[in-house]
């Protein structure tokens, strides 16, 4: 195991000075076991992916069956592959409004790229608007609409013609004018510290986009598939996007992303020129089969409703731990945030929790905000165990 960890550090490109470094042996439900047999509760669900739990047996069965039938056969969009078609049809039934045409990708960032390109081509406009604190992925286009200059600056120049507005400030929406191709927004900002906008904000944004003819792209990569207590978070505010971006839980643990829109918008990708936006592996049949199985579990077990109920109870329990170290607790469904007093306290808190068997971390743009986003299937005794450890870690400060 020491050898494996040494090779991990030497041969896998490191993205931070202090990776968790847990040597994974297996994962099931809410738990990940390391090579010594130690169990950890995964309060990040593989970073918002395992909404139905790790390695759900129905998802594993679907993967196995699809792998035995066929793997990759053709670039995206050329052949009729049943898992792709069935998953697209199911998403079309469940998505708000008339979002009925799905373009499958490999990841969230790639889906954001596709959505931005679609908006520019359809409208013939170049300007893009995004929000301070937003996170949409790390490819060039997605990074260009990322709302934290610290992460943009080392890679500049990025896409030209991007403007940032303050999140959740309705008067600033006046700055969206008829030169704007698209506005991209997370309905609840994840990496920005689990920021839940006031009730009027997203409906006002929808109205403004319609007024000026800009497309509204709603990024549901982290908030989708029941995470916030509704199947898609935009439903909390009755907002119908022009394009919705999906990934993470979409693939049930396999890599899969998508952007979804009405036929009148999505048809722009089929001509002038044809094949202008293609992908080899997007919508891989094994990922789509896994996603379809996960979606059926999510709906059958009413996991969005469960997330709303269990999340509200947990929020109450966590709020009772507030004090000088834990300044605030907020959340929507099972996307919760603990706001601590200082970055140092946050780091010590996370280390204490990890040593006691909890996988959690602070958000990318806020080093004092710990995000909790466990599988939506998390059992009540697992929540109790996590709350006890969190309470101990706070008392330890
Ligand atoms: N959009 C949001 C809101 C995200 O949280 C993320 C990833 O965390 C992405 C897009 C990018 O997705 P991916 O990491 O699959 O490229």
Image (spheres, rainbow, N blue to C red):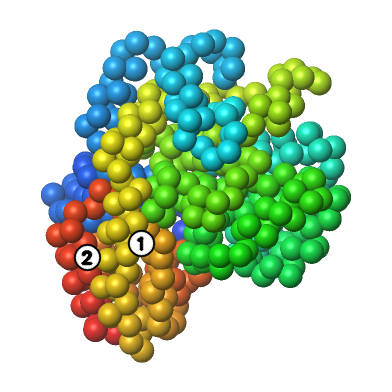
Residue 310 visible in the picture: yes
**Residue 210 percent location from the top left of the image:** 75, 48
- Relative to residue 67, is residue 191 depicted above or below? below
Q: Residues within 10 Å of mark 1 (few under 14, many from 20)?
A: many
Residue in the image at 51% along x and 30% along y: 92
Q: Position of residue 146 (x, y in %)?
A: 64, 56
Q: How crowded is mark 2: few (under 14 residues within 10 Å), some or many (20 or more)?
A: many
**First-in-chain label (1 vs 2):** 1
Residue 65, by quadrant, is top left
Q: Name the residue under label 2.
A: 386
Point 59% across, 17% down: residue: 77
- Which residue lies under the disc numbered 1? 372
Instruction: Please determine whether, in this image, residue 177 is positioned above or below residue 322.
Output: above
- The quadrant of the rendering that contains the C terminus is bottom left
Beta carbon at label 1 within 8 Å of ligand 1:
no
Helix, strand or loop at mark 1 = strand
Viewer-nearest residue: 335 or 143: 335
């Amino acid at each position: 195991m020491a050898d494996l960890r040494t090779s991990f550090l030497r041969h896998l490109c490191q993205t931070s000075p202090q990776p968790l470094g847990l040597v994974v042996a297996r994962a099931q439900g809410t738990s990940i076991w390391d090579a010594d047999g130690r169990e950890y509760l995964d309060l990040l669900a593989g970073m918002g992916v395992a909404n139905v739990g790790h390695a759900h047996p129905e998802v594993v069965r679907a993967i196995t069956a699809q792998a035995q039938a066929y793997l990759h056969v053709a670039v995206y969009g050329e052949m009729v592959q049943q898992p792709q078609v069935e998953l697209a049809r199911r998403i079309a039934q469940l998505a708000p409004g008339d979002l009925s045409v799905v373009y499958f990708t490999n990841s969230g960032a790639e889906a954001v790229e596709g959505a931005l390109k679609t908006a520019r081509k359809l409208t013939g406009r170049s300007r893009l608007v995004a929000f301070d604190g937003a996170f949409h992925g790390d490819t060039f286009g997605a990074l260009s609409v990322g709302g934290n200059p610290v992460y943009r600056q080392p890679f500049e120049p990025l896409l030209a013609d991007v403007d940032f507005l303050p999140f959740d400030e309705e008067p600033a929406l006046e700055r969206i004018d008829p030169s704007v191709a698209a506005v991209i927004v997370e309905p609840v900002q994840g990496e920005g510290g689990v920021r839940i906008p006031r009730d009027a904000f997203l409906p006002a944004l929808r109205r403004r986009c319609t007024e000026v003819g800009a497309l509204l792209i709603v990024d549901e990569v982290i908030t989708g598939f029941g995470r916030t207590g509704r199947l898609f978070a935009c439903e909390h505010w009755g907002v119908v996007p022009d394009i919705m971006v999906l990934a993470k839980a979409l693939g049930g643990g396999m890599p899969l992303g998508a952007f979804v829109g009405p036929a009148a918008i999505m048809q722009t990708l089929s001509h002038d020129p044809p094949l202008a936006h293609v992908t080899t592996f997007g919508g891989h049949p094994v990922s789509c089969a896994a996603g379809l199985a996960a979606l059926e579990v999510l709906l059958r077990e009413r996991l969005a409703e469960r997330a709303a109920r269990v999340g509200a109870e947990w929020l109450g329990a966590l709020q009772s731990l507030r004090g000088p170290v834990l300044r605030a607790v907020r959340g929507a469904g099972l996307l919760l945030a603990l706001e601590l007093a200082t970055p140092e306290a946050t780091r010590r808190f996370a280390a204490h929790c990890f040593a006691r068997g909890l996988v959690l971390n602070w958000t990318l743009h806020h080093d004092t905000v710990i995000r909790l986003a466990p599988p939506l299937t998390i059992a009540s005794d697992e929540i109790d165990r996590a709350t006890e450890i969190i309470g101990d870690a706070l008392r330890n400060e």
